[in-house]
Image (cartoon, rainbow, N blue to C red):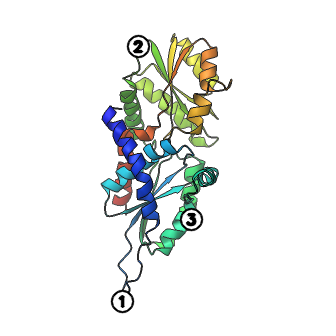
Amino acid sequence: MTQSTMSRRLFLGTAATGTLAALAGCAAGASSADGAAAPAAKPVILVTSFGTSFPTSRHITIGAIESDIREAFPDYDVRRAFTSQIIIDHVESDTGRHIDNFEEAMDKIVADGVKELIVQPTHLMDGFEYTDVKESLATYEDKFDKVALGKTLLSSEEDQVAVAKAIKAGMERLEDEETAVCLMGHGTEAESNGIYATMQQVFIDLGYDNYFVTTVEATPTFDDAVKAVTDAGFKKVILRPFMVVAGDHANNDMADPEDPESLISVMTKAGLEVTCVIEGLGQMDTIDDIYVAHVKDAIDSL
């Protein structure tokens, strides 16, 4: 990421809070004082994220994606929902600010008289969170004239290649021929966990032989990653999250040297020289552009 891109991301992060708060306070379709018919409610794009309790990362990742979508589709009201109630409660406890869960956001959209809705997830894959959104959305479909659910980040081979190339471009400032790059995803018990093995193959097919994929809670495991990196002969490794945000998992499960089970500790114990890059994928313009393209695809499907 260039310095100018990072500056823009930081600006978007600071500005996003006020913008979203203002949007949340606007009730679409209110009646006019003279009793005239209310204007039709603007169509809505509901950007649905797992969420993070880390405010800076939240603003420069999820906030940046939302801002890019808002800029690309000015005729739509862009709103936010999180799918993790634990994170929603944490944010409210820390800041006093409430972020809607998916059902709360949907109920408000229905109450506002919205008739055209796009739900765009920022999830990486079609895991449990995405399935829950899909199933919940189905219960609201009869409330709208037009409704569509956008694709996840890694939903197609084209997107997988684009993501791999974007990560490679963003890491070139740091890597060299003697350094491995290890990307840490979350992992899931859902069948979609296979996307991590798929992405490993995508990196190989693109000739990025120093790129390795691991997960916190599934496979490939941290031990798998250590073996792959050391078997390939690397002595140095850069760790970065394979997640939209750089929140709790990135800061603790990946980069906390005091935690003996963290990825940095496991790699260091194996004799590797470790550097951590705590940046979410949502900080990259090229990644955000994929989400914007998915929104356009969803709109075109209506």
Tag of residue 109: none
Name the residue carrying label 3.
104
Counting from the top left corner in percent of width and height, residue 25 is at 46, 67
Give how far apart the Cα atoms at labels 3 and 2 are: 49 Å
Mark 2 neighbour class, 10 Å CA radius: few under 14, some 14 to 19, many 20 or more:
few
Residue positioned 36% across, 53% down in the render: 69
Residue 24 spot, x, y in % from top left: 46, 64
- Where disc 2 sits, the SS reads loop
The image quadrant where one finds the N terminus is top left
Quarter of image, res 251? top right
* Number of the label disc, if any, that sits on residue 34: 1
Relative side of 174 to 220, left or right = left
- Indicate the amino acid at tag 3: Glu
Going by the numbered disc 2, the residue's amino acid type is Glu
Other-residue count near label 1 (Cα within 10 Å), few / some / many at <14 / 14–19 / ≥20: few
Up/down of 284 relative to 169, above or below: below
